[in-house]
Amino acid sequence: MPSRLEEFVARRERKARKLADLVALLQDPELADDVADLLQERQQSITPPIARRPIAEPSSNGNGNHSALPPGITAALTAIGPALPDPFTIREAAEALTAGGYIFARDSINTVRDALYWATRADEPRFRVVEAGRGGRASTYQYIAEGN
């Protein structure tokens, strides 16, 4: 009876052989067009909806499915920055983005938190931390106008 280690090694070796076969098939010139089509379909299926939406003025057709916000969370935050309260919290920024029609690919609070973390540390930051949150209190941020 094989040991757990032997079973593990055997599974890894089978997987390595399968991956080698897959690589050979992906590099087959006869399958190049099919592989390109599959990769393009895969890329489109994992791209968040906001990244595929063009920058546009709000639609006047009344259906409310159009956003004037640019794609990308940092660009969208910068676009709404002047309209945010001074100071503002992550929740307030997420609510403003949602109200503006931004479609989040994942949790809005975590997305805005991550974006503000990097936006405050950029070479030319457009946001700054007013007060770091502690003891259950939310951090507050401030939009920095261009040229300040």
Image: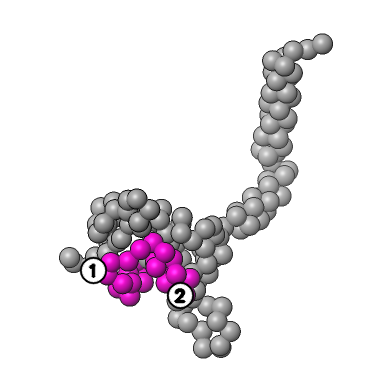
Residue interval drawn in magenta:
78-100
Dot 2 falls on a residue whose secondary structure is loop
| Amino acid type, mark 2 | Gly
Q: Are marks 1 and 2 in contact (CB under 8 Å)?
A: no
| Image mark count | 2
Give neighbour class at mark 2: few <14, some 14-19, many 20+ (Cα, 10 Å): some
Q: Please tell me whether residue 70 is drawn above or below residue 5 in the rendered image.
A: below
The residue sitting at 78% across, 12% down in the picture is 2
The answer to whether any part of residue 93 appears in the image is: yes
Question: Which quarter of the figure has residue 113?
Answer: bottom left
Image coords of residue 61 (percent x, y):
56, 88
Name the outermost residue toward the left.
148
Residue occupying the point 68% across, 51% down: 38
Residue at image x 25%, y 59%? 130
**Image-based side of 32 in relation to 47, left or right:** right
Quadrant housing the N terminus:
top right
User: Which amino acid type is shown beneath numbered disc 1?
Assistant: Ala
Residue 67 tag number: none
Mark pair 1, 2: CA separation: 20 Å
> Residue 148 appears at what percent x and percent y?
17, 65
Badge 1 local density, few (<14 within 10 Å), some, or many (20+)? Answer: few
Query: Quick one: SS at disc 1?
Result: loop
Query: On the image, numbered disc 1 is attached to which residue?
Result: 145
Q: Point out the tag, 1 or 2, that comes first from the N-terminus.
A: 2
Q: Is residue 13 visible?
A: no
Magenta run includes residue 96: yes
Residue at the spot of label 2: 100
Q: Main secondary structure of the magenta part?
A: helix
